[in-house]
Amino acid sequence: MPQTADTSLPTFVAEPDALLPLGVRVAGLGLGSIDYLNDTITLDRRAATLFDLPAHRPIPRDELHGRIHPDERPAIEAQVSAMLSPGQPDCIDVVHRVMTADGSERWLSARKQVTFDQPEGEGRRPVKGLVAIMDMTAHKAAERQVQDLMQEMNHRLKNLLTVVQSIARMTARSGPIEEFLPRFNARMAALAHNQDLLVSRGAGGVALGALVREQLQPFTDGAQDRVTISGPDLPLRFQAIQPIGLALHELATNATKYGALSTPEGRLDVAWQIVDDKMTLSWTESGGPEVVPPQRQGFGSTVLQGMVEGALAADVTLAYRPEGLHWALVCDSHQVHDSQQPR
């Protein structure tokens, strides 16, 4: 059979030394050659750009070192001095900031190597050197972002554990021990709903309407036509999600056992608004059994008043009206809403 021509792409073959300039360019490296006898350094165009210095002409080493951030310059110069001393490794790696012309900071990673006038001996002197420089600013920004996220996660976890401890303590004090586990599990489920919202909404935040619906959903199955939820789109600050979510859970639990959600005739209205930088959130029941004020203050009352007031610097009203329970909180809008987010 006749042979067919090979139509595949040709293999790129080159000597390693011929690939060096390409490799330097692909790696984004800037290069500099150092003359220790004249105490100067000559930078290529990329390295010169990183230091805001002229390219392709000798400049004093002190002028380059003057670009290093003042907080890091002593340590860098100590490392360079040690490299230039007899008996020390002839290569070092350093990471430091430089101050740019516009006052911002740039992170650089540099590898420096020195050549001496003789291989060994106490009297040998550094003659020349080479430095390869890489811009690490983007890497440092990403590293800082990860650190900030970890700190924020740690802070939120500690806050959540504090809430769990408080719930466990107050649940144990507010009823018979045999009822502790189901009531505690129900309150943990309310916290879990809040966390699910945080994860699913991500950077977009959790809106108050979504939080209200998430907390009411387990209690209003089949009764949605008797529940009215109204208010503007209001992204919540993280610090507001847990106290408001827990308050809504306690209100819904109470309404299902004793209030408007315990009978087919009962109605529930949840509404919120912002007027003159004041946010009002109200829960109003009607049409259910006649309301009788409780004989003692339990965990629910603590959440509905004390926890919300403390967390949001709010004024809270809890009224046991005969026609139906009414609860409302009023606070500065910045306590619950990030004004930089759209409503």
Image: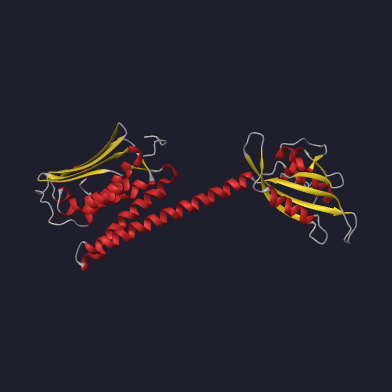
In percent of the image, x 53 and y 51: which residue is there? 146
Percent x, y for residue 217? 27, 49
The foreground one among 252 and 100 is 100
The extreme bottom residue here reads 178
Q: Quadrant of residue 213?
A: top left
Percent x, y for residue 244? 30, 47
Total labels: the figure holds: 0
The foreground one among 39 and 267 is 39
Q: Is residue 68 left or right of residue 263?
A: right
Q: Is residue 247 left or right of residue 131?
A: left
In percent of the image, x 41 and y 56: which residue is there? 157
Judge whether residue 245 can be spotted in this image: yes
Percent x, y for residue 137? 63, 44
117 above or below 138?
Answer: below
Q: Quadrant of the C terminus?
A: top left
Percent x, y for residue 129? 82, 49
